[in-house]
Image: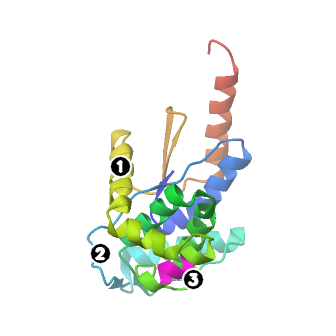
Amino acid sequence: MWSDYICPWCYLGRDRTELMRRLGVEVIQRPFELHPEIPAGGRVNPGGGRLDRVFEVIANECRDLGIPWNRPVRTPNSRRALETAEVTRLVFPTAFDQLDASLFAAHWVEGLDIGDQVVLDHLVESAGADPTAVREQVAEGLGARLLDESMAEARAVGVCATPTWWVNDALLIPGAQPRGAIERWITRLLERERVPGD
């Protein structure tokens, strides 16, 4: 699954990922920088227009599913957060799942700036990793290399937006599709794989 912490559909997509896992699919989360054009200091979310409609849809579905969600007033540049998460995955793998979840919660629930190094250090440490070691590896370029590799892999299979799941080299699922559709697709794919010669 390719995702970006600042993508509202990716936050909702975590529910779809958990559904896939319950169906027996191992999901590996990969970074995808959706909006590299956002300045380093982030930007204020304007009122009105398409973004308001997206947030309304996300808010309604999160409410229906019992998922906490608060509309953010700003959108940070996510590159530092994505690089930090990838370095953590590689260097402190047991801390990655908690950091991944806390980065989404920080932006979509707590209203924190995940582009801020102090916030990132706190989240990394809370996840059980060494923030100094992670920060140093990011500064040396490891995070950038890992993110660039992930982006290249995503583009090679046709990913151009987030979230996107690439299932068993056979099924590309773009966007937070309806839960029922995902369950049908995954179930059929798994059934086909269990039938010899099919």
Q: In the rendering, which numbered label is found on residue 2? A: none
Check residue 149 in the rendering and tell me which mark sits there, or answer none.
1
Local SS, label 2: loop
Quadrant occupied by the C terminus: top right
Q: Where is residue 87 in the image (x, y as percent from the top left)?
A: 46, 61
Is 197 situated above or below 58?
Answer: above
- Residue 146 quadrant: bottom left
> In the rendered image, which residue does mark 3 sit on?
70
Asked if residue 153 lies left or right of residue 30, the reply is left
Residue to which mark 2 is pinned: 38
Q: CA separation, marks 2 and 3?
A: 21 Å
Q: What is the C-alpha distance between the residues marked 2 and 1?
A: 21 Å
Q: Residue at x 54, y 82 (%)?
A: 122
Residue drawn at point x = 56 percent, y = 49 percent? 28
Amino acid under label 2? Answer: Ile
Q: Nearer the viewer, residue 173 or 39?
A: 39
Residue bounds of the magenta highlight = 119-123
Of the numbered discs 2 and 3, the one sitting upstream in the chain is 2
Secondary structure found at label 1: helix
Q: Does the magenta stretch include residue 68?
A: no
Q: Position of residue 44 (x, y in %)?
A: 35, 87
Q: Distance between the residues labelled 1 and 3?
A: 32 Å
Residue type at numbered disc 3: Asn
Left or right, 3 with respect to 151, comes to right
Dot 3 alpha-carbon crowd within 10 angstroms: few under 14, some 14 to 19, many 20 or more: some
Tell me whether the residue at label 2 lies in contact with that at label 3, contact meaning CB atoms closer than 8 angstroms: no
Of the image marks 1 and 3, the number of the one nearer the N terminus: 3
Q: Can residue 33 be seen in this view?
A: no
Q: Which of 102 and 9 is in front in this view?
A: 102
**As shown in the figure, which amino acid type bears the numbered disc 1?**
Glu
